[in-house]
Amino acid sequence: MRVETILAFLFGLIFCGILAYAGLRTEPIPPQPFFFLRVLSALSAAGIAAVIPGFIHLKIAHRGVLSLRAGGALAVFVLIYLVNPPTVLSPVTEAKKAAMLANYSQGLHDDALRIAEEILEAETDDVEAWNIKGSVAFYRSDFTNAVAFFKKAVDGKPDSTIYKNNLAYALIERGFHTQGVEILLSIRDNREDWDFSIGRAYVYSADFVLASKHLEGVSSEYWHGAARVLEAAALVGLAAEAADASDKSSLIEKAKRKLRLGYAKDTAYWDKIFQGGRDKHLGYSEPLRILREAGLVETFVSG
C-alpha cells in the first residue's frame, strides 16, 4: 500500500472521529461553518474509503448541464458531499407543513386541518400542527378547543412566545382572564406587541388603570389602530368607576377621541369589526361590549 493511501486513511480516521464528537455533543453546531464541515466530512469518508476493498462507480448528470463521473474514493467524496440526510428522511413531512401553513394563510381552514391531522398521525407532538388546529378553532370561536390545542403546542415548545401568546389569547376569550394575564406576564419583554397584548388582557380583566398604562405607549399604527380602540374601552371603564361627574364626562370625551383616531387608521377593517366581523388573530368581544354599552360605537359609526 502506498504512503499516500495510508496518509489519506489516517486523515480520514482522525477527522471522522472529530466530526463524530462534534455531532454527538449536546451543544449545537452553529450554521456558519456548515460548508467547511460538509467538505471535511466528505474528505474524511473518502480517505477511509481509499483502503476499503471494492470499487464504487458514480455518475451524476444535472439537467444536462453538469455531468460527473467518479470512482473509488472520489465517488465516496461526491456521494457524501451531495447527500443531505435531513432532506432524504423528511421531505414528505416538511412538504405537508408548508402546504398546511399555505392553506391556513389563504383561509382554506378545512384543508389546513386535514393536513394537520395527517401530520399528527405521524408525529403526535408536532407543535406547528397543534398550533394550526388551535388557530382554526380560535377563528371559529371554538375557544375551548383552541385552549386545548394551543396548550399542546406550548407543552411541546414551552419557550415559544408565539404559542404562549396564542394560548393566552384563547384563555382570555374563554373567560380565564387571570390565567391569560399570568402567561403574558411570564413572557414580559417590554416590546410594543407585548404592551398591546397585556393591555388588551387587562381590558378583559377589568383592570382599566393598567390597561391604559400599557396601551397608551403603543403606536396608533399598530394593528389597524387597535391600541386606540382598546384604550377607548379602558377609558370608558375608568369613567364608569369615577365618582365625580366631571371626571366621567372628561374620560368619555377622551375615549371618543381615541376611538375616532383608531378607526381612522383602517376604516374598512373597523367597519367589519363593528358590524360583527372577526379578526382571525384576536377578538374584541369585551372591548366592544364596553363601548356599545356606553353608546360610543353606535354614535361613532353614525357620525
Image (cartoon, rainbow, N blue to C red):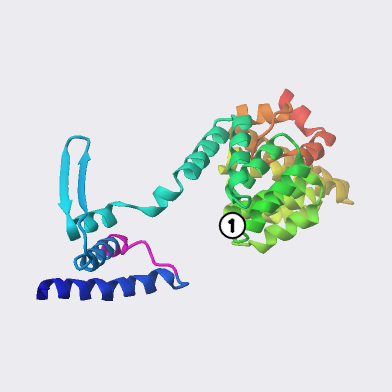
Residue 51's x, y, as percent? 20, 68
Up-down relation of residue 250 to residue 274 (above or below): below
Does the image show residue 230? yes
Q: Amino acid at mark 1?
A: Ser
Q: Which residues are magenta?
A: 28-37
Which of the 4 image quarters holds residue 280?
A: top right
The N terminus lies in quadrant: bottom left
- Look at 27% across and 74% down and name the residue there: 13
Q: Which residue is mark 1?
A: 160
Residue 288's x, y, as percent? 77, 37
Up-down relation of residue 146 to residue 13 (above or below): above
Does the image show residue 250? no
Please tell me how crowded label 1 is: few (under 14), some (14-19), or many (20+) other residues with Cα within 10 Å: few
Asked whether 30 falls inside the magenta stretch, the response is: yes
205 on left or right of 183: right
The front one of 156 and 91 is 91
Asked whether 91 falls inside the magenta stretch, the response is: no
- Look at 86% across and 46% down and name the residue there: 240
Which of the 4 image quarters holds residue 255?
A: top right
The C terminus lies in quadrant: top right
